[in-house]
Amino acid sequence: MKRLFALAGAILLAAAPLKAEDTVTDFVLDNGMQVVVIEDHRAPVVTHMVWYRAGSADEPAGSSGIAHFLEHLLFKGTKTLEPGEFSATVAANGGRDNAFTSYDYTAYFQRVAADRLELMMQMESDRMVNLQLGEAEILTERDVIIEERNQRTENSPGALMREQLNAAQYLNHRYGVPIIGWRHEMVNLSLEDALSFYETYYAPNNAVLVVAGDVEPDAVLELANTYYGKIPPNPELEPRARSQEPPQTSARRMVFEDPRVAQPYVTRSYLAPERDPGNQETAAALTILAEVLGGGTTSVLTEKLQFEQQVAVYTGAWYRGTSLDDTTFDLTIVPSQGVSLQDAEDAMDAAIAEFLEEGVDRDHLERIKMQLRASQIYARDSVDSLANRYGAALTSGLTISDVQAWPDILQAVTEDDIISAAKQVFNRKTSVTGWLKAPENVEVSQ
Amino acid sequence: MIRFLSAILVIVFALPVQAGVEIKEVTSPGGIKAWLVEEPSIPFVALEVRFKGGASLDAPGKRGATNLMVGLLEEGAGDLDSQGFAEATEALAAQFSYDVGDDTLSVSARFLTENRDAAVQLLRSSIVEPRFDPQAVERVRAQVLASIRSSEKDPDEIASRSFDALAFGEHPYGSQYAGTQESVAALTREDIIAAHDGAMARDRLFVSAVGDITAEELGFLLDDLLGELPAEGAKMPVQAELMLKGGTTVVEFDTPQSVALFGHEGIDRHDDDFFAAYVLNVILGGGGFESRLMEEVRVKRGLTYGVYSYLAPKDHAALYIGSVSSANDRISEAVDVIRSEWAHIAKDGVTEEELAKAKALLTGAYPLRFDGNGSIARIMVGMQMDDLPIDYIETRNDKVNAVTLEDVNRVASELLRPEDLHFVIVGKPEGV
């Protein structure tokens, strides 16, 4: 049974299409804007996305949440578009639009009939530089993002604990600050904060255009030159250099108690290297390690903790390799009824220690690689997921050739690579362990 | 084995949103029907199988049996135990998923052309000969119980549970299909086998396929995959009586943001006014940022991150429902705004301009749904379950465009009944 726990979702192991070179074309405009075109001519539909190399980890100290707040404000109008007119125009053309913010990027997209691409480019290029905001809109929309935080975080003990875990994981890097922002800073975010972030980061030389669907690369290039090509680059854009982590020298532990917790669990994160340009081998080994440990019924943790010892109702392992700076490798165990959090944590650690001794099962690795190869076929059915893959990679420090080399690098991972990456990453000194539980009932009735 | 190609009946219809693509109605030699779009450009097939009835077929006192049974389909079948089944699936890189809801049991599969026969055999065994091994039953039961425990302290889940109970009482719609801790703890292996026999039968079966497969190949696949299922399953659930009355129910729960579900009676999928109601809902609360509720509650007042309304034409009852969440000190204002917008649109209707915008959104967005093998297969199986004709895709936008302002406003005045709206609010709402 797969979908019982939505604690952290499954890791996506999908890779680039079977013959990436057949469907992907890329350009760079004179002003530095990168363009990626992914062709899929099965349906007369296109996804148009602009990704900025600016996310919450690029925010100035003290205004956490401004990247995400600005994302909301980009729907509030420009010199030529009324507030709300952007989305209304997309809807009037039968399309849908939205945006999302992460640590390393902010992205805007529309999905429309392929013959409306030009209108999307016209409007998206307009709001890259012509945003016009009023004080009243700022205040109302700030209430909206606070309600968004209420919904995503304040109403969820698991999400509240994850914030605390991340903050403890990163001693000096902005990945320790939540994407949506700390509440006490969100309530003071101002028009000036938003405009300052906008003026610094929203420029063609800090953006990636991804167009995916029923389009021809030459036609996309021509339109991109017409609409985005005329926008001057921001010459003051600095290279992305965030404050980095010092050596982490002590294991951190926390107990997060909340009366709303019905199902306690243990989660552990370790600092881990990310995919770097031209150097993705360790990340590839960690990607497969997460599958070996936590990828479903035949995985090591499931086998040992759910089938053999029966101490867990659920176990999981995750690794998010697409990241500009150091990322994390995460483990989770949800204990069976009657098993304490300490016993669950001990069992998880013992299972990992055993795994490091026993090594990787060759047949299991072969099955994982078969699934990875197949995922390249299945991925061709979803041009949007391909678009997301390129956008996220190119705004997280990777190049197109890194994205296209990734499937082969995954296939080349050996049993020894996986064990050696595991030994490198599973270092308690760089780890944070969290227990999520309800408070003990101190009022014992007589 | 000699196969008789002539026994496969194929009827072809055009699918206009994708030039050159057509839906075929395939009937297998054994009489199983399926809708097919052949799409050989990517070497895999997306297959969707549905059984009507779903979790509402749970026998009295056996709440959660169908859900637990569905969770066990991939936990051992034929010669394979749970891990053996998972290993075999992984080795073929096939993807199977099994799901259940109030009205429907779903099996979704994707498998590669290169090992299609082996993948179909594996899928077949999970559908027709699941093992329900005692160890697997206990393991999955513990997972279901853990998820039920979690849902008891989740404000969204508490709201659904309270709303459903108020609306439908003792009918299966009135309780959660996962069951309660007590009902799931009491289920036996015999209950699970009975749930399988009752829910997965050929008299309630719908199938669609899209991908690298011909009509002939699909015809034989259907018999291999599903031919051994029993011809008849359990008696279908009875019509549900909607017991909801206007008002507000507060469920106290200590959390910063209140979650509200609201609704009253809806409209049947086959009602002549369904399209007018559908267009009306886009304008009221179903059209994302362009809806009136979103404009009034979020954009103008910043009271929520999201507010939505939906037509919910279930198989045995029809609801018109919505949801919103706001901080405890702001939820009462959100509720007031929703009530007043509901009344406003019931009394004054919508404008010609709003209608035109809603039609543009609906008709323009429709072709965008047909954007992959998996999505086309899901649409086609849904059409069959809704008893829509195979040429529906061709006529659907015409039906939207045929809706007049008079239709929408008449339906608004009949369907929207602000005095009947019931709000269930979970949290510590102030001033409600």
Image: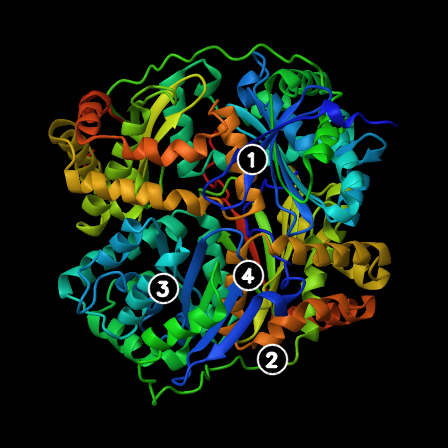
The amino acid type found where label 2 is placed reads Pro
* Sequence-wise first label, 4 or 3: 3
The reply to whether residue B223 is visible in this rendering is: yes
Closer to the eye: label 1 or 4: 1
- The answer to whether B289 appears left or right of B6 in the picture is left
Chain ID, mark 3: A
Q: Which residue: 31% across, 39% down? A: B286
How much space separates mark 1 and mark 3, taking CA atoms? 49 Å
Query: Is the N terminus of chain A in the top left, top right, bottom left or bottom right quadrant?
Result: top right
Chain ID, mark 1: B
How much space separates mark 2 and mark 4, taking CA atoms? 19 Å
Closer to the eye: label 1 or 3: 1
Question: Along the line of sight, which residue is nearer the eye, B148 or A200?
Answer: A200
- The answer to whether A243 appears left or right of B283 in the picture is right
Numbered tag placed on residue A386 in the rendering: 4
Looking at the rendered structure, the secondary structure element under dot 4 is helix
Looking at the rendered structure, the secondary structure element under dot 1 is strand
Numbered tag placed on residue A181 in the rendering: 3
Residue A252 image position (x, y, % from top left):
57, 66
Looking at the rendered structure, the secondary structure element under dot 3 is loop
Chain ID, mark 2: A
Residue A279 image position (x, y, % from top left):
66, 79
Closer to the eye: label 2 or 4: 4
Chain ID, mark 4: A
